[in-house]
Image: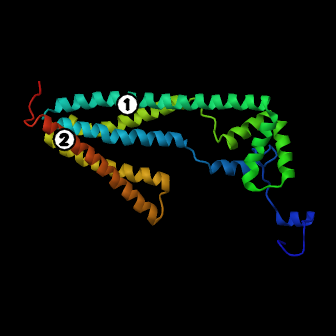
Amino acid sequence: MLGGRHSHWSPQDLEEQDFSPYGTFPPSPTVSTETSSSIASTRPRVNPRIVSDAILGLSDGLTVPFALSAGLSALGNSRVVVVGGLAELVAGAISMGLGGYVGSRSEVESYEATVRETKNLVKASPMETMNIIRQVFAPYNLPDEPVARMSHILYNSPEKLLDFLLTFHHKESKPGCNQAWISAITLALGYFIGGFIPLIPYFMVDQVLVALYYSIGIMIFTLLVFGYVKTCVVRGWTGKENIVAGIKGGLQMVIVGGLAAGASIALARAINPTGGALF
């Protein structure tokens, strides 16, 4: 029983409570395969970084090329809209992909530098390493004896010590070996796919104004759906609050895309009021 006259637990009491084991590090092979499989089945199937990159690529692709194609449509030439839109799509997708690759490579290099610094610290300053371990446990107000025992156990296991310091002290996780390429491809494809949608009407309709109206209608629907899905992926799909937040996210995307397209059309009209050839 908790509280009361008993100052300690007897072995029988512990057995009756049926406590599940807890460990700081991954479970040993003795853990039942049934438990491991049930835990694994609850883990997300998709890498959150891939979802984040896809959302970023689609978000930019659905706004920038749409605004450009809407602005170019003010010139009154569908060929200009298609050629200019495709050129921007290719350049933008390459730029997004390179940005994602460079950013991911920087994360890998930063992690590798942290690993080297941590290894050098463990070799050069054992006392400082022990102090860092104690500082990690300090916020939990644990007794000194188990903390000291845990510190010695960790220090005698170099691999676990390195993993412990990286995870709990530096708060860094090891990037995937192909993360840079995956991030680059995801961003580039997301941008290209998102940006190609507003160009579709210009391939099918000869009249630029009619194609523009179709493009605006398609993009209002696409931005609304994308904003809703993007918000619900983060917040959740069920519940009144999540649904309302998803609708707000969709409306925000429509407003942002509308403002960008409106500014682009206004600028094109200001530069070329007659809609004729510029050169």
Quarter holding the C terminus?
Answer: top left
Which dot, 1 or 2, sits closer to the camera? Answer: 2
Amino acid under label 1?
Ala
Q: Image quadrant of residue 265?
A: top left
Give 203 or 114, whichever is nearer the viewer.
114
Q: Position of residue 251 (x, y in %)?
A: 33, 55
Give 171 or 52, whichever is nearer the viewer.
171
Q: Position of residue 99 (x, y in %)?
A: 44, 30
Q: Image quadrant of residue 228?
A: bottom left
Residue 104 is at least partly visible in this image = yes
Crowding at dot 2, Cα within 10 Å, few <14 / some 14-19 / many 20+, comes out as many
Q: Which mark is residue 265?
A: 2
Q: Position of residue 95 (x, y in %)?
A: 39, 28
Residue 218 is at least partly visible in this image = no
Residue at screen point 77% across, 32% down = 122
Q: Which mark is residue 93?
A: 1
Residue at screen point 28% across, 27% down = 87
Q: Image quadrant of residue 113?
A: top right
Q: Is residue 241 above or below residue 106?
A: below
Amino acid under label 2?
Ile
Quarter holding the N terminus?
Answer: bottom right
Left or right position of 268 against 43 = left
